[in-house]
Amino acid sequence: MKVIKTKLNYSNSYIVLDINLLKIDCVAPFDIFIKKDDDFVIIIEAGTLISESLYTKLKNQESLYISKKDEDKQILSCESLKHYIRHNRDNPQKRVMILYKISEQLFDIYATNKDNIIHLECVELIIKSIIYLIKYDEKFLKNTMPYFENDHVLYSHSLHVAMYALSLANMLKFNDDDLLKIGVAALLHDVGLKKIDEAIIQKEAQLTQEEMKLIQKHSQYSVDILNQNKIHDPYIINAVMHHHERFDGSGYPNQLTGDEISNFASILAICDVFDALTNNRPHRQNYTTFNALKMMMRDPDMVNKFNQKYLNIFLKSFL
């Protein structure tokens, strides 16, 4: 057990650590101290893997401490997300579970407040964490997708679309500012569904014309909610408004065609449909990655719907 004497010896700079917050086979998200001779010494450095034997040794200590500045890192939160992601970057299953938990927290808070307030700092932290992982792991999607949840709830669909969109945008050499914008647009593209009757969204039978018109309003609702939260960036707004536009003019709300559809919206269109196809829906089972991409590229009803250049680059994400 490595012991490093610190230069700090102010007891009010440290707080007691609950050992139950540490998990075997996970890394320590902070330096861990013990008190010795009226001083505090590090016995575990941040990033150390907690093995079963090491966990036992820690449990046998009279008291464990962490720096007070690391207090928020004791629990997974938006504020501690960056730290947890960096220390689990080599564990695809763990890192995606962390992103799921934070995204679920974000959307639960949004869904349960009547004023449609979105925690925008948390949105940005989630997107920056995904960007970090994509740049760290060249095979990010291929390594991460096996651990995706197969459902169609808002938080998981939105997170999936954000990861797909950021991976594609990164392959298209978007700069960091544009990566952040496309990520925010992707994570928040469907927030307007909150204003649609859940019974319509979950309906297994074919939607009536009137129900379809209601569903199609969600793009405008999403934009309204983003504006309400003081998101006015034209690239983000355009992408959210037009993520259901199709290259052949069959989309909504404005029946745009080809180059009339922005790069951002074209990316979201591909990623949104791909995630819908690869997850269960009330009226059907999910398609495999291969079959979903094959449908989007070759099916007579879908072949002219998307930016084919982007679609072919997206395919390379899974190779």
Image (cartoon, rainbow, N blue to C red):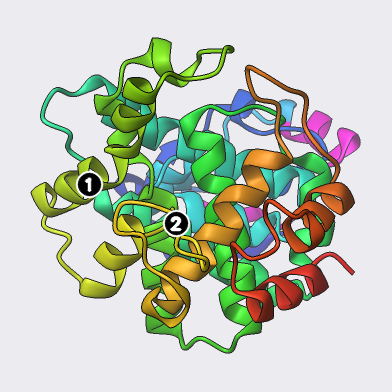
The nearer-to-camera label among 1 and 2 is 1
- Find out whether residue 50 is within the magenta segment: yes
Where residue 293 appears, as percent x and y from the top left, is 79, 57
**Residue type indicated by callout 1:** Gln
Query: Dot 1 surroundings within 10 Å: few (below 14), some, or many (20 or more)?
Result: some
Q: Which residue is mark 2?
A: 186
Residue at x-position 70% and y-position 54%: 88
Instruction: Give the percent coordinates (x, y) of residue 45.
Output: 66, 59
Residue at figure coordinates x 17%, y 44% from the top left: 225
Query: Which residue corresponds to the image point at 53% horizontal and 46% vertical from the top-left?
Result: 159
Residue 233 locus on image (x, y percent) = 20, 71
Of residue 150 and residue 87, the one placed in the foreground of this image is 150
Can residue 77 be spotted in the picture? yes
Label 1 close to label 2 by CB (< 8 Å): no
Q: Is residue 288 above or below residue 185?
A: above
List x then y, in percent, for residue 57.
80, 34
Q: Residue 44 versus residue 224: which sits nearer the camera?
A: 224
Eyeballing the image, is 147 above or below 20?
below
Residue drawn at x 38%, y 50% as measured from the top left: 189
State which region is magenta. Answer: 39-58
Residue 275's image quarter?
A: top right
Q: How busy is the neighbourhood of tag 2: few (under 14 within 10 Å), some, or many (20 plus)?
A: many
- Please tell me which of labels 1 and 2 falls first in the chain: 2
Q: Is residue 159 magenta?
A: no
Q: Which residue is mark 1?
A: 220
User: Viewed as shown, does residue 309 lie left or right of 255?
Assistant: right
**Quadrant containing the C terminus in the rendered view:** bottom right
Q: In the image shown, does 168 or 299 lie closer to the viewer?
A: 299
Amino acid residing under circle 2 = Ala
Q: Circle 1 sits in a helix, a strand or a loop, which is it?
A: helix
Q: Is residue 90 visible?
A: no
